[in-house]
Image (spheres, rainbow, N blue to C red):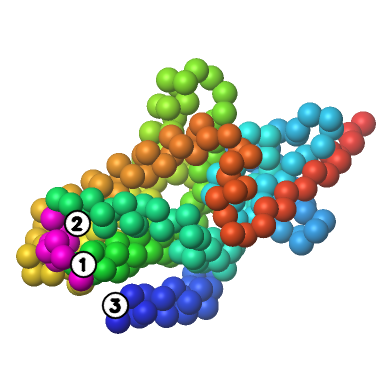
Amino acid sequence: MQRFFWWVCLAMAAPQLLMAAAPDTQETLPDAPMPVADAANSMPRMQAPAASGGAVVYAPMYDRTIFPGEVAPRMTVKGKFIYSLRQMVEPVNLVPTVFSAGEGQLRNTDPKYGTDTGAFEQRIGAALIREDSDRLFTNALLPSLLHEDPRYYRLGVGSTTARTEYALEQVFVGRTDSGKSIPNYAGFLGRAMAAALTQAYYPDTSQGGGVVLRTLAASLGGLAAFNVMREFVPKEIFSHLTIFGHFSSAKPAQQTD
């Protein structure tokens, strides 16, 4: 468990280090959405289609899912680390941790700590380190360095098949801070790094490249399932899955002559 505390310390210190090493430069792309000013905090936001009634709906800053018709705040380096740290402390995120540890306990899969009570506690600790390192790499560290947006943008229209295909594609498709579609470098490389890091704290019986590849495959499969959930779960349910308040706002759209 000592390594877990070291990871927490790293997560807390990393924002200051990266803010100095990798300033959050903005891209200007001809095919990217145009930023609009947010009078509340002067944060540039990516323009989405206006909601009905002539109002623009602003998504909460740290929402993991951006819905159609919402204007998404653009995240700074500091914002991406806050986004990642919030996920680490969300109680709902203990569900996959306990599920993973329970499955490993029943099947005695990696990490192979055994099947007694102490082994289950070790599995819980290992799962927390693995998942939090995954969140640190994929939602904060690499998106900051590569200027990527770690959030999921819901399609919300079309057939069930089309929306499912879209959700699965987002495992491999990412977007820059300015909204341009790119390969999901941060998501894939971050999960590969978290999988490789397991070799630093897994027992000797769970060492080797095969374990790393299986861990990576399981992580990508979990992301695919989570994306499908984010595509179809009603928006209202998301507000009950967080300990943080959701404060979205609707502002009048700018009038044009």
Question: Is 23 one of the magenta-colored residues?
Answer: no
Question: What residue do we see at 41% from left, 76% from top?
Answer: 8
28 horizontally vs 226: left or right? right
Q: Quadrant of residue 228?
A: top left
Can residue 248 be seen at all in this image of the molecule?
yes
Disc sitting over residue 117 in the figure:
1
Residue at far front of view:
117
Q: Badge 3: how crowded within 10 Å, few (<14), some, or many (20+)? A: few
Q: Which residues are magenta?
A: 108-118
Q: Quadrant of residue 237?
A: top right
For disc 2, the marked residue is 105
Task: Give the structural element (helix, strand or loop) at label 2.
Answer: helix
Distance Cα–Cα, label 2 vs label 3: 18 Å
- Indicate which disc, 3 or 1, sits on the residue closer to the N terminus: 3
Can residue 21 be seen at all in this image of the molecule?
no
Q: Quadrant of residue 253?
A: top right
Q: Position of residue 209 (x, y in %)?
A: 11, 57
Q: Position of residue 241 (x, y in %)?
A: 55, 50
For disc 3, the marked residue is 1
Q: Are marks 3 and 1 in contact (CB under 8 Å)?
A: no
Task: Give the structural element (helix, strand or loop) at label 1.
Answer: helix
